[in-house]
Image (cartoon, rainbow, N blue to C red):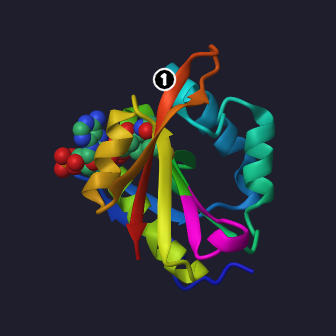
Amino acid sequence: MIRQTTLQPRTSQLRDGRSVTVRALAESDHEAMTRFGSALPEDDWLYLELDFHNPNTITRLVNAAAAENWRQVVAEYEGAIVGYSNVRLLPGWKSHVADTHLVISEGWRRSGLGLEVAQTILEAARDLGVTKVIAEMPDEQRAGRAIFKHLGFHVEGILNNHVRDHHGHYHDMVIMGYEL
Ligand SMILES: CC(C)(COP(=O)(O)OP(=O)(O)OC[C@H]1O[C@@H](n2cnc3c(N)ncnc32)[C@H](O)[C@@H]1OP(=O)(O)O)[C@@H](O)C(=O)NCCC(=O)NCCS
């Protein structure tokens, strides 16, 4: 069961004056998540591990809303989801580590929303009991690298030609880590 200590809904005012609610993903978010995912730009579709354009991905995420080893948060504005992040506990000898994903709607970027959502998900990672969080992304994802650096993550490794995008092109994958 998700403990509600770190995932209580809270309202944040962004730099541009807009206010969003950051809260746990709920099973009832299926439609809103579908709209959020299908509106993401082509670059995100190309470079994100999670294919938010795919209905199966949305169903999988929403079905995991209460998963014991996951935490998922969304940013909501007037009923629309404008940001998503998760942390997932890794199995076996990496069970002290979680990986994370973070995506903000195109029209909401550079307003501080990514930081709001990321800080909430890092609190949720603490709640999961992990001591380390990693973020993996293709080298091209400059904004992703920048925000995780801003949050205190460091590049821990680069794997050559490790990911293949939806056009079949290979990319180096950057692994960034953060000790909680
Ligand atoms: C990466 C992403 C989540 C950033 O979200 P955001 O809401 O725009 O981020 P914020 O406005 O909170 O920015 C926080 C800090 O991150 C850095 N940053 C964010 N986007 C940046 C960019 N495009 N270029 C340079 N620095 C950037 C800056 O240091 C920024 O602080 P500043 O605005 O005071 O300079 C968003 O661009 C996104 O969803 N990209 C596609 C998905 C992705 O790459 N995810 C990461 C890998 S999982």
| Residue 50 image point, x, y percent | 64, 40
Residue 52 falls in image quadrant = top right
| Residue 33 image point, x, y percent | 66, 44
Above or below — where is 62 with respect to 122?
A: above
Left/right of residue 68 with respect to residue 42 in the rendered view? right
- For badge 1, the amino acid type reads Asp
- Name the quadrant where ligand 1 sits: top left
Q: Residue at x 40, y 33 (%)?
A: 141
- Residue 93 in magenta stretch: yes
Q: Which residue is mark 1?
A: 43
| Residue 171 image point, x, y percent | 50, 26
Q: Residues within 10 Å of mark 1 (few under 14, many from 20)?
A: few
Left/right of residue 138 with respect to residue 61 in the rendered view? left
Front-most of residues 70 and 23: 70
Q: Residue furthest front?
A: 160
Above or below — where is 20 with respect to 164?
A: below
The N terminus: image quadrant = bottom right
Front-most of residues 5 and 88: 88
- Residue 17 in magenta stretch: no
Whether the residue under disc 1 has CB within 8 Å of ligand 1: yes
Above or below — where is 162 with respect to 167?
A: below
| Residue 98 image point, x, y percent | 57, 66
Q: Which residues are magenta?
A: 86-99
